[in-house]
Amino acid sequence: MALDTASKAARYGRVGRGIVGEVLTGRLGWTAFSFLALMALWFVSAALLQSRVFPGPGEVVETLVREAQTGALFHHVLVTLARVTVAFVVAMLIGSAIGIALGASRQADRFFDTWLIFFLNLPALVTIILCYVWFGLTEVAAIVAVAVNKIPNVAVTVREGARSLSRDLTEMAAVYRLGWWKSMRHVTLPQLAPFFAAAARGGLSLVWKIVLVVELLGRSDGVGHQLHVAFQLFDVSMILAYAIAFILVVQAIELGVLQPVEARVNRWRR
Amino acid sequence: MASLSRPLNIRVDAKTFPAVADRPAQAVLRGIEITVEPGSFVVITGPSGCGKSTLLNVVAGLDADYQGAVDFGGGDPKLSFMFQTPRLLPWRTVAENIALVLPEASADDPRVTDIIARVDLTEAASAFPERISLGMQRRAALARAFVVEPDILLMDEPFVSLDDPTAESLRGLLRELYARRPTTVLFVTHDRTEAAQLGTRLVRVGGRPAGIVQDEPIRLSTAERGNRDRVLAERARLFAEA
């Protein structure tokens, strides 16, 4: 009884007071402190250098506000975000399917391992150029280029998970005749959840960086294209404004989407 | 109600584990034939590591790499398997785990809530398996094995590594569930008292590769199974020469 109450308290503590309390005093406090320190360093060095190509935080924020007011910022950020989303989803789906298949079949793994290593080491830039050459300067080419860059990473991560699937649970599913779909949905995929999470984490940051390159090389909108324009004008303030805007968006996705999903998926853990 | 319409015939002429790395191939089972009458409760005992679990896996269809045949007497019987470990999905609650094995059932299906009440897990129905004790996890596994109303129930030392009172209460639950819905049971254990208390027939395997060394009925009435002295006397008779 006493033990029961104690364990309950521990559990609620982690869910309730834990997150709010810990974040405010601990992690969030440190994050704010280190962020302010970085800003201060930037401010001071920009003030000392007084260079046209190294604007301070004030100037960058001004540019950010101006771009936001004209609507250009939202347009380009949303376009890029759309490409990131589509490429990310496509890469996760195809990469996971390949990873599960390779984890399940040793023969397939032996055969395709070399291919995987080839694609893992293929420079992103090469894929992008080839896609544009082969498919033209189209949206599809852009998405394919990004997805092809990301798929091998997802496949390798998910393959690790698929190799370590519990045989005990697979047998249970077989004896009780759960069927393919039920076994996949309730037995296999939940075991792979941590690997999906790892692939998604690494994936998002990789995908959005590649999307910018894709846009720079062959699209006429999106953050990458804006950076291209700013580069030609040597407008560093604009470059930093768009970079910061996108970092904020990606962080928001990480905190607002990925982490809550992960917390929900992991709620059964002790 | 009675499960199989015709006897179940298990014949394993030979079962060998293939060589792995520097360990040579190992013959596990040889010349085993058991014909199980529908509704009987066959207890299979023998020294640990002699291949009892392998035999159950063969019957369950989990191990197809053997010489012989398992004949269910025609038809396609419904199997349940209560493993040595509970093998519950940790990301599903107790009720969801039990509902999973029923086609088209949710956790609040009456069949699920009913069996949960019978194994006295109603309060833990919405708990995740890793947050309840091993004894409770075993009860959930027992409920899952019975909820599908199996034609054949396979049990592989399902009450091992529990303290005595917990194991005893689980055996009591098994007898209740079995009395309420008789089925054909193959029950592997190395606990001789448990064997005498639960089974209607004892099959003892031994040797290497293992064959059948003893096969005889267990002579206890349902009432006598609740009497510890009668159970111990029968155990002494069954294992007299062992």
Image: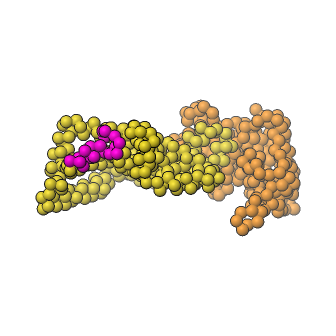
Place residue A40 in its image quadrant.
Answer: bottom left
The structure residue drawn at horizontal position 21% and vertical position 39%, both measured from the top left corner, is A68
- What is the magenta range? A215-233
> Is residue B223 at all visible to an observer of this figure?
no
Q: Is residue B118 left or right of residue A39?
A: right
Chain appearing in orange on the rendered image: B
Main SS class of the magenta portion in the image: helix
Query: Which residue occupies the foreground of this view, B88 or A59?
Result: A59
Q: Is residue B23 left or right of residue A191?
A: right
Q: Is residue A94 left or right of residue A146?
A: right
Q: Given the current orientation, which residue lies at the most extreme front position? A: A133
The structure residue drawn at horizontal position 79% and vertical position 45%, both measured from the top left corner, is B41
Identify the colour of chain A in the image: yellow
x and y percentages locating residue A185 in the rendered image: 56, 40
> Is residue B78 at all visible to an observer of this figure?
yes
Question: Is residue A74 found inside the magenta-colored segment of the image?
Answer: no
